[in-house]
């Protein structure tokens, strides 16, 4: 009985101990908050293990925020290596620096300018001119790292710091490894200036950037349309560049080239330009210009695409380039103020003597007249009057030569009758020159005045369409003197003419028709009588009277109305000057008497050139006669 009692007590003891254990477990179970904390700690332990192991791509997004942040850090470390800190910078944020002329928006992502707004100018339809907008440009540095990664700055986030130095705004954009190691873009904008100081430099990256890999700077820009005439804007859009020690050059509109020692490159868009300058010349620079405009009915947004790709050099393991950006107008006088840069060549005032005339004559005449705050249409008219007055002595010389030729024309016709046929061509030419020489008449005296006027014609052909001051200025029915005037839309397009009617080209064509009609008689006097076997110049001139106005009408219909206005007024003035000279200045009777006096005078000693020419003609005539005898 005692044994059974002991067993029973043992059973009761075990039951009591089990009950106590259950009660203790129940009373000491963790709260929901404690369970969540334990779960987080276990996950963190797993992440730590992942960081020590070979990296893997994590695609599942954990619901706990700490897990998401940690995975993002792991991914940033895997993708960016030393520059993982870039992932902590807000990629969507931007910083603005501006003055009274230009407003620049710089994005954290890429540290680059994403909007360049020129405050004083509008596009043809009224929107502000923005040379950079809507991702049409990119500035990127491609480089390798010592941990075998290839990175592009346009994909990385820069940390901005905006400060002030006097009136200058300074924006530092840093792509950081840590506080002491970084790649920096430094922008400095001065008041009242389109030029921005820009620097690309690194600090402490000697062990981060792989010097054995190429470091490439890439700058691309797709030019938006800014002007009413896409054709004109495309025509005056070019890729300019300055090679160290050489003159400014440019690419053809669809071309590519590789150049060494470039001081600057300019992406010109007719009246505006984007320029990148460097104190350390770009070597082995690959430059590309691609024309995007072909048809005005199809291509209505972009004109050109430009690109620069050039390697950058490390110095002592670091990048250190002092550069400048220029986002602004193509203003010859303004660009000329940046001395020693030759940026004024971007204004394209013409080559050779044409550029010289524009730069040193017409720029100052135009600026002087514009200083009186007149309407720019009146400025063009006054400038035309000034040019025609300056050129009037040449017109007078031409008319005097024409009058002299008219007086001796009967004698030259007699010579043609006396020496007919091809076999007498040399003798006929000798006799004609003898008559002209005795009368003091030279064929060149009529040609030279016309030739001297040609440089002025071509210089102004470049001057007016490139003149920024005319942009957006109205006169009479023309709302923009830098573009075509439009009085009627056809609703369809005529090849080489367009889909609109411009009035100034019509007026200029009518004026040139009457000018050539009046000038025909003068030119006929200047021409020697038609000789056998030679083309009839008079017939050709008659054809030109009708062909030239039609050509001008088609050619100038889409050109700047300022150019058509100039030619219209110029031809009217030339007609008036011709009438005055013909009716009130030239006295044909007096000229005839002078020629007769010249004939009586002993012939002057011939110049060496004249003597050699006469001897050559005599030899040719002797050979011709010998050939005729041989045939007989």
Image (cartoon, grey):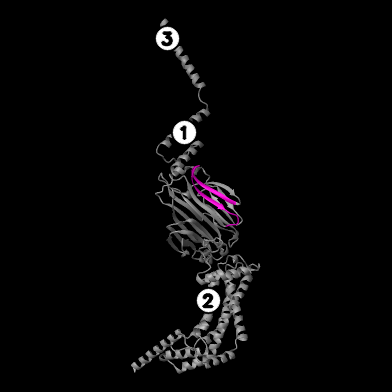
Disc sitting over residue 44 in the figure:
1
Question: How many numbered callouts?
Answer: 3
On the image, the x and y values in percent for residue 260 come to 43, 59
The disc at residue 7 is 3
Q: Please say if the residues under marks 1 and 3 sit with CB atoms less than 8 Å apart.
A: no
Which dot, 1 or 2, sits closer to the camera?
2
Q: Look at the picture and state if 164 lies above or below 436.
A: above
Q: What numbered label is drawn on residue 290?
A: none
Which comes sooner in the sequence, label 3 or label 2?
3
Label 2 residue SS: helix
Q: Quadrant of residue 194 in the image?
A: bottom right
Nearest the viewer among 16 and 390 is 390
Crowd tier of the residue under label 3, counting other residues whose Cα lies within 10 Å: few below 14, some 14–19, many 20 or above: few
Alpha carbon distance from label 3 to label 2: 135 Å
x and y, in percent, of residue 628 in the image? 36, 92
Camera-side mark, 1 or 3: 1
As helix, strand or loop, the secondary structure at mark 1 comes to helix
Q: Is residue 614 magenta?
A: no
Residue 454, which numbered label?
2
- The C terminus - image quarter: bottom left
* Mark toward the viewer: 3 or 2: 2
Q: CA distance from mark 1 to mark 3?
A: 51 Å
Neighbours of disc 1 within 10 Å: few (<14), some (14-19), many (20+): some
| Magenta range | 168-193
Q: Are marks 3 and 2 in contact (CB under 8 Å)?
A: no
Q: CA distance from mark 1 to mark 2?
A: 84 Å
Q: Residues within 10 Å of mark 2 (few under 14, many from 20)?
A: few
Q: Main secondary structure of the magenta part?
A: strand
Camera-side residue: 95 or 38? 95
């Amino acid at each position: 009985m005692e044994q059974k009692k002991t067993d029973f007590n043992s059973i009761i003891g075990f039951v009591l101990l089990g009950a106590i254990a259950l009660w203790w477990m129940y009373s000491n179970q963790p709260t929901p908050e404690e369970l969540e904390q334990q779960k987080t700690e276990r996950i963190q332990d797993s992440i730590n293990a992942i960081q020590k192991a070979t990296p893997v791509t994590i695609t599942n997004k954990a619901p706990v925020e700490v897990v998401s942040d940690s995975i993002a850090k792991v991914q940033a470390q895997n993708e960016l290596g030393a520059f993982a800190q870039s992932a902590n910078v807000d990629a969507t944020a931007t910083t603005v620096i501006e003055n009274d002329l230009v407003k620049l928006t710089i994005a954290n992502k890429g540290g680059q300018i994403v909007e360049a707004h020129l405050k004083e100018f509008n596009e043809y339809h009224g929107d502000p001119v923005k040379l950079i907008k809507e991702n049409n440009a990119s500035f990127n540095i491609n480089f390798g790292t010592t941990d075998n990664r290839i990175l592009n700055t346009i994909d990385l986030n820069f940390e901005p710091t905006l400060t002030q130095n006097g009136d200058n705004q300074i924006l530092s954009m840093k792509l950081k490894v840590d506080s002491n190691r970084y790649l920096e873009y430094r922008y400095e904008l001065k008041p009242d200036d389109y030029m921005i100081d820009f620097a690309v430099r690194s600090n402490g990256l000697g062990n981060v950037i792989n010097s054995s890999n190429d470091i490439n700077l890439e700058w691309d820009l797709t030019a938006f349309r800014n002007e009413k005439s896409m054709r004109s804007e495309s025509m005056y859009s070019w890729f300019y560049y300055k090679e160290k020690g050489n003159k400014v050059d440019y690419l053809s509109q669809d071309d590519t080239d590789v150049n060494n020692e470039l001081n600057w490159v300019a992406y010109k868009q007719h009246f505006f330009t984007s320029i990148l300058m460097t104190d350390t010349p770009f070597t082995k620079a690959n430059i590309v210009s691609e024309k995007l405009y072909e048809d005005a009915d199809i291509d209505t947004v972009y004109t050109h695409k430009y690109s620069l790709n050039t390697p950058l050099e490390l110095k002592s393991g670091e990048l250190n380039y002092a550069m400048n950006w220029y986002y602004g107008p193509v203003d010859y006088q303004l660009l000329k103020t940046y001395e020693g840069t030759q940026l004024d060549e971007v204004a394209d005032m013409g080559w050779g003597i044409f550029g010289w005339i524009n730069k040193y004559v017409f720029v100052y005449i135009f600026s002087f007249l514009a200083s009186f705050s007149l309407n720019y249409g009146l400025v063009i008219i006054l400038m035309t009057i000034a040019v025609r007055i300056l050129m009037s002595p040449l017109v007078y010389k031409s008319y005097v030569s024409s009058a002299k030729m008219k007086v001796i024309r009967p004698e030259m016709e007699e010579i043609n009758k006396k020496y007919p046929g091809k076999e007498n061509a040399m003798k006929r030419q000798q006799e004609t020159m003898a008559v002209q020489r005795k009368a003091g008449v030279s064929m060149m005296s009529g040609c030279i005045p016309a030739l001297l006027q040609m440089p002025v014609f071509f210089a102004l052909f470049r001057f007016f369409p490139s003149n920024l001051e005319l942009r957006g200025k109205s006169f009479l029915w023309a709302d923009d003197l830098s573009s075509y005037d439009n009085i009627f839309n056809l609703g369809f397009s005529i090849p080489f003419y367009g889909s609109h009617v411009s009035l100034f080209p019509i007026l200029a064509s009518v004026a040139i028709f009457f000018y050539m009609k009046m000038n025909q008689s003068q030119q006929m006097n200047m021409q020697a009588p038609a000789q056998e076997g030679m083309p009839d110049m008079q017939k050709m001139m008659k054809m030109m009277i009708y062909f030239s106005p039609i050509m001008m009408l088609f050619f100038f219909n889409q050109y700047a109305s300022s150019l058509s206005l100039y030619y219209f007024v110029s031809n009217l003035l030339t007609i008036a000057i011709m009438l005055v000279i013909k009716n009130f200045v030239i006295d044909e009777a007096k000229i005839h008497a002078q020629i007769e006096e010249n004939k009586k005078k002993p012939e002057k000693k011939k110049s060496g050139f004249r003597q050699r020419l006469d001897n050559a003609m005599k030899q040719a005539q002797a050979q011709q006669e010998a050939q005729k005898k041989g045939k007989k």
